Amino acid sequence: MSNTYSQIYLQFVFAVQGRLSLIQQQWRDELYKYISGIIERKEYKVFAINGVADHIHILVSMKPTESPSLLVQEIKRCSSKWINDKKLVVGHFNWQEGFGVFSYSQSQVDQVVKYIANQEEHHKRKTFIEEYTKMLSCFNIDYDERFIFHKIE
């Protein structure tokens, strides 16, 4: 789109189906590179990608030509296929339905990058549910407890 100028910074958060701890340390970086490739092929910029065994965070700068939902759908579809084709987990890998998306100003980007980079340390003190519900609350997002990422018992 000519004469369309934008700078949209979005942090995506999504979990493994059932919040199972399936994203293993030995192939986690390779997964992040693969996901970064999906995003960069769309000519978006990845500022940070990181997570722990049961969920990931991605900070992206997007253009207004695609919806966040379509981007996450493609990331989930392609990365699930990649994990399953490589047989990196026992059984079948899926991402949990739904995701969180949070917008930031340019002045907040460095802070969010540091936050995402520090996920391992952060989750020694706070659970994913505590982190996620705090983010929802900080952004004044109404949510239904029934649809928050729940772990399979």
Image (cartoon, helix red, strand yellow):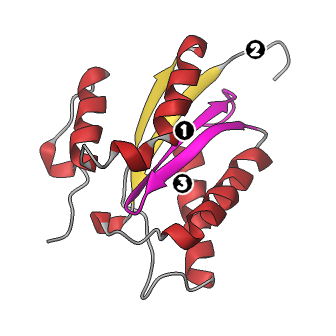
Q: Mark 2 points at which residue?
A: 5
Q: Where is residue 101 in the image (x, y as percent from the top left)?
A: 44, 35
Q: Which of marks 2 and 1 is nearer the N terminus?
A: 2
Nearer to us in this view, 79 or 4: 79
Give amino acid for label 2.
Answer: Tyr
Q: Mark 3 points at which residue?
A: 73
Give amino acid for label 3.
Answer: Gln
- Residue at figure coordinates x 31%, y 31% from the top left: 135
Q: Earlier in the sequence, mark 2 or mark 3?
A: 2
Q: Can residue 60 be found in the magenta stretch?
A: yes
Q: Residues within 10 Å of mark 2 (few under 14, many from 20)?
A: few
- Residue at figure coordinates x 69%, y 57% from the top left: 33
In the picture, the quarter occupied by the N terminus is top right
In the picture, the quarter occupied by the C terminus is bottom left
Q: Position of residue 41 (x, y in %)?
A: 79, 49
Q: Where is residue 110 in the image (x, y as percent from the top left)?
A: 58, 23
Q: Where is residue 34 in the image (x, y as percent from the top left)?
A: 68, 61
Nearer to us in this view, 55 or 4: 55
- Residue at figure coordinates x 20%, y 58% from the top left: 150
Give amino acid for label 1.
Answer: Pro
Point out which mark residue 68 bears: 1
- Give the distance between the C-alpha atoms of the residues marked 2 and 3, in whole angstroms: 25 Å
Q: Residues within 10 Å of mark 1 (few under 14, many from 20)?
A: some
Q: On the picture, is 127 further left or further right than 121?
A: left
Q: Are marks 2 and 3 in contact (CB under 8 Å)?
A: no
- Give the distance between the C-alpha atoms of the residues marked 2 and 1, in whole angstroms: 17 Å
- Give the distance between the C-alpha atoms of the residues marked 1 and 3, in whole angstroms: 9 Å
